[in-house]
């Protein structure tokens, strides 16, 4: 399943269109899709209004199975590729227009590719099954349909297993791109279209991309070191695990390591840490506190039809700033297995929405070990504990749009403290009274990777008390589009480690923008 949080507090969720009828009907006047056994008048794309909890069905004309996406600077979702009649289609979605399809827009078929927004607002579309190349949306003016060969993907593919699909892409503050595939990474300049440097291989050589699906995030960027970036890659499956599961029904234990590197350092090296639980097909979600939630997945096998076993129902919290050896904490378990084709994403309220799971070729609800799961849960991170409500801020005013490096302000309130100063309880690891502002770019979540998710901590200056319980913080917008690409962000006020609900703020493109 694919998930994208959109401005206005909507969550778009959609699936492949060739699995058969879904459980949600299209609106009476919506066009039905042709199917092998007649017309399919059910929805394979729905929009959840978080404010009202109402689902709205949307017709989807072509098949977006195992596709990719990125939120454009104007708030429209760009969605690329898929399978069969959708593999070369680019799609645009907004709640007002629904799906708008651009047939044959892509120069190559894109199935299991990755999309990433660049500092100029363009989107790079990289990889996919048997596609060792990339292209851009919108097209280049000079070479509108040109493909650029990317040999790194050719080098990292494996016969029959591949293990380099849905490569992990992260935009670094200097505008270069970190690409992880299989068990290694490179940094390259997408504008000059050439690899800049190869990073060391991850110790142990465990594949971490589909179908040995681990996950990855760019750790939060800090205002005191805007040029410094670190990447975390967690989980995966040992080499050969896919073949063993597929051919012999042998389900090898998943990997339990995380690898962390600062690709912006002069001499970067991987540091290896061990999770409390082994995991493949896990989702990593960046939280407004700067922590990372690892959720969903299995403890054995790989991604693919019927190839995962031993669901991991306990999420794990990773605190990147804690001391080595004290960064992981196992949290409360769900009762629902979330296996292949499950997804997770942060919402406007600081919750993590967790949904889906379908390890079968079609919808199968009975007489199988892991039935198709259509439910959506909200996981509440530790900062949602009601005992912290005395410290929880509420945003009263934030800018609708800001430019790079601009000074702005965020107004918020907290429950009235004793003595009229910010105080009260504090979340674990946070100082009482500390005020931070985090800008979070919402992810396009699918197949264990949240494309384009990003946390940028903003510089906070003077915090002035305006009234009883009401404050205004001076805030510096991100300095460059390499630090924060143009588009919509969730701005959370974090007081004593406890985040508010978010305000939507748009980073204005430097040029005309998209």
Image (tube, grey):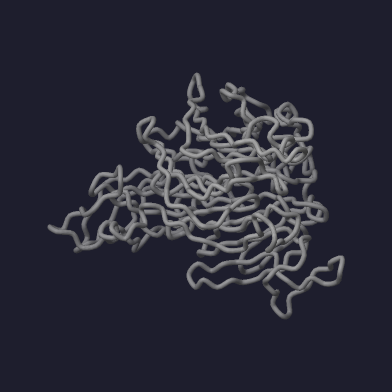
Q: Position of residue 215 (x, y in %)?
A: 57, 40
Q: Position of residue 363 (x, y in %)?
A: 72, 61
Q: Quick one: quadrant of the N terminus?
A: bottom right
Q: Position of residue 313 (x, y in %)?
A: 52, 50
Can residue 456 be spotted in the picture?
Answer: no
Q: Nearer the viewer, residue 191 or 94?
A: 94
Q: For this view, does 211 lie left or right of residue 272?
A: right
Q: Residue at x 65, y 50 (%)?
A: 340
Q: Nearer the viewer, residue 399 or 332?
A: 332
Quick one: which residue is furthest to the top in this view?
267
* Number of callouts: 0
Is residue 360 depicted above or below 24 in this figure?
Answer: above
Quick one: which residue is furthest to the left in this view?
419
Q: Residue at x 65, y 52 (%)?
A: 341
Quick one: which residue is furthest to the bottom in this view?
28
Can residue 396 be spotted in the picture?
Answer: yes
Q: For this view, does 316 lie left or right of residue 122?
A: left
Is residue 273 depicted above or below 316 in this figure?
Answer: above
Is residue 394 depicted above or below 331 in this figure?
Answer: below
Q: Position of residue 181 (x, y in %)?
A: 65, 33
Tell me the quarter of the picture where residue 16 sits. Answer: bottom right
């Amino acid at each position: 399943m694919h998930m994208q949080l959109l401005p206005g507090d909507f969550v778009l969720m959609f699936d492949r269109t060739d699995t058969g009828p879904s459980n949600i009907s299209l609106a009476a006047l919506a066009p039905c899709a042709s199917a092998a056994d007649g017309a399919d008048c059910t929805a394979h794309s729905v929009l959840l209004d978080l404010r009202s909890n109402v689902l709205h069905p949307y017709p989807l004309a072509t098949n977006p199975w195992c596709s990719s996406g990125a939120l454009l600077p104007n708030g429209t979702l760009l969605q690329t590729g898929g399978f069969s009649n959708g593999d070369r289609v680019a799609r645009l979605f907004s709640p007002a227009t629904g799906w708008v399809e651009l047939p044959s827009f892509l120069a190559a078929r894109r199935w299991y590719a990755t999309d990433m927004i660049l500092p100029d607002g363009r989107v790079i579309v990289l990889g996919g099954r048997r596609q060792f190349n990339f292209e851009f949306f919108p097209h280049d003016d000079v070479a509108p349909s040109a493909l650029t060969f990317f040999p790194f993907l050719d080098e990292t593919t494996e016969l029959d297993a591949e293990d380099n699909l849905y490569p992990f892409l992260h935009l670094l503050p200097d505008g270069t791109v970190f690409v992880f595939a299989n068990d290694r990474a490179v940094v390259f300049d997408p504008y000059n279209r050439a690899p800049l440097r190869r990073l060391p291989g991850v110790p142990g050589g465990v594949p971490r991309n589909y179908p040995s699906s681990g996950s990855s995030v760019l750790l939060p960027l800090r205002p005191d070191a805007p040029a410094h970036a670190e990447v975390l890659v967690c989980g995966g499956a040992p080499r050969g695990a896919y073949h063993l599961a597929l051919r012999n029904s042998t389900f090898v234990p998943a990997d339990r390591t995380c690898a962390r590197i600062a690709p912006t350092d002069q001499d970067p090296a991987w540091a290896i840490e061990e999770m409390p639980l082994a995991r493949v097909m896990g989702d990593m979600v960046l939280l407004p506190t700067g922590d990372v939630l690892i959720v969903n997945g299995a403890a054995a096998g790989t991604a693919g039809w019927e190839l995962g076993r031993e669901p991991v129902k306990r999420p794990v919290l990773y605190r990147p700033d804690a001391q080595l050896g004290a960064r992981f904490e196992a949290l409360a378990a769900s009762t629902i297995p979330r296996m292949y084709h499950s997804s997770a994403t942060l919402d406007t309220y600081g919750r993590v929405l967790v949904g889906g799971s379908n390890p079968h070729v079609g919808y199968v609800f009975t007489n199988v070990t892991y039935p198709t799961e259509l439910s959506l849960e909200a996981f509440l991170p530790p900062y949602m504990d009601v005992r912290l409500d005395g410290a929880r801020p509420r945003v009263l005013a934030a800018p609708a749009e800001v430019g790079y490096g601009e000074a702005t302000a965020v107004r918020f309130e907290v429950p009235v403290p004793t003595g009229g100063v910010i105080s009260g309880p504090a979340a674990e690891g946070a100082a009482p009274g500390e005020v931070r502002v985090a800008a979070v770019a919402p992810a396009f979540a699918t197949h264990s990777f949240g494309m384009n998710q990003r946390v940028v901590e903003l510089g906070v200056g003077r915090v002035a008390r305006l009234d009883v319980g009401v404050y205004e913080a001076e805030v510096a917008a991100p300095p460059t589009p390499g630090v924060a690409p143009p588009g919509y962000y969730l701005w959370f006020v974090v007081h004593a480690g406890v985040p508010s609900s978010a305000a939507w703020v748009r980073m204005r493109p430097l040029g005309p923008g998209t």
